[in-house]
Image (spheres, rainbow, N blue to C red):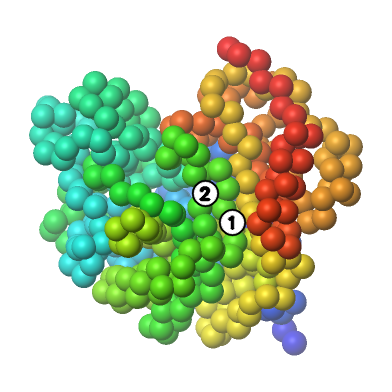
Amino acid sequence: MQRRNVFVLGLDHFNRRKLERTRAGAECHFIGLIDPSEILEADYFPIEDMLARAEAQVEAFEAPPDAIIGYVDFPVSTMLPILARRFNLRAPSLESLLRCEHKYWSRLVQREVVPEHIPRFELVDPFGDDPVGALTLDYPFWIKPVKSSGSYLGFRVGNAAEFAVALAEIRAHIGIFAEPFDHILEYADLPAEVADVGGHYCIAESLIGGRQCTLEGYVFDGEVCFHGVIDSIRARNRSTFLRYQYPSRLPRRAIRRMQEIATRVLEHIGFDQSAFNIEFFWDAAADNVWLLEINTRIAQHHSDLFEKVDGVSNHDVVVDVALGQKPRFAHGGGEFAYAACCFLRHYHDGVVGQVPDKSEVEALAADVPGMIFEPHVTAGTRLSDLTHQETYSYALALLYLGADDVPSLRERYQRCRKRLRFDIRPD
């Protein structure tokens, strides 16, 4: 059988292994486009240059492409439909993708079909004459750019003074995503209500909350399907993620309501031929469901969780959809009943001294089956130099774990946390 050529934007070693273990993996040749360091560690995205280099690499390959895929947020997610259109490959339209990823446009579209399941929101021009005075939302609220990644430049604002501080930070750093996002918008046919709302704008939203989870799924030839629900466990500050845990422990009736809402929104948007993940809150006291955010890709932090529990990662649906095959995802074929992706975090700036060495990690892995340790820092790293961090903490590493039940999962996390020591010297 002739192998199919699948180009992957930002392909790294960790995700290559996941892709090669998908059901279609043996039939595919996975070719990386754009070095992952240009995406994950960059503070500048030359979109036109990245698109030109990716296109040239595909054209220069020895055989025609069968698919172009990705699993990373901006700029990968927004580059995909542009490249796919150039090579006549399966992907959502750029406009339908932006109706999900442009946070203000997405809320406008969501309000048309599920107004009772979204927060109040307003557009904010951080460079306007008086953005504090112009806003009518009551405190507290969240403010974030209309396009960002990983909660970067997202602030919980409790009063006018905090709003002013947040605006100063946003003005200083929003260009990292705003300028390349504006380049992406030039490729799209935008409606009047968002035609002038570029990447330098923000959206303010009233607070919503409850137990958070993410629905992962895909749309194939117009049919919306779901392959998993992952719980998102936050810290007490209500913003920082501590871990993603699969499968979800939310009530089935709450999940069904989320699936119904997600289906209505995606069909209304016209999103098709792609995987997605949609973040929700379930407010148990009010028995209400809130739609937080739509992402037009799988979540790579979930990939190992699916593999541990179901025997194959969520990359499986990405490859199938891109190749024009109805996904064959099946549940329960993995080694563990539960799995988690845990963030090892530090909450103050400093310089990294000692990090867990290879022998320590290997010894711990021998004691904890299925453990994967993925460090994000090395000795000498200044935490404030890390790119694309959330507002309230720094991610030192990721820890992937599996277990037969949730108490065992927590015990394994505590055991690993005690032995994986980082020395952070205060600045």
Q: Which residue is located at x 66 percent, y 15 percent?
A: 425
Front residue of 392 and 253: 253
Q: Which residue is located at x 52 percent, y 49 percent?
A: 233
Q: Is residue 214 visible?
A: yes
Left or right of 53? Residue 185 is: left
Left or right of 80? Residue 16 is: right
Q: Which residue is located at x 26 percent, y 39 percent?
A: 141
Element carrying mark 2: strand
Front residue of 245 and 69: 245
Element carrying mark 1: strand
Count of labels shown? 2
Looking at the picture, how far across and down is residue 147, in whole percent? 35, 47
The earlier-in-sequence mark between 1 and 2 is 2
Quadrant position of the C terminus in the picture: top right
Q: Is residue 51 above or below residue 143?
A: below
Left or right of 66? Residue 280 is: left
The three-letter amino acid code for the residue at tag 1 is Gln
The three-letter amino acid code for the residue at tag 2 is Ile
Q: Which residue is located at x 30 percent, y 75 percent?
A: 264
Looking at the picture, how far across and down is residue 126, in whole percent? 22, 32
Would you name the residue on which mark 2 appears? 233
Quadrant position of the N terminus in the picture: bottom right
Which residue occupies the extreme top position in the image?
A: 427
Would you name the residue on which mark 1 appears? 245
Q: CA distance from mark 1 to mark 2?
A: 8 Å
Check whether the beta carbons of the residues at disc 1 and disc 2 lie within 8 A of each other: yes
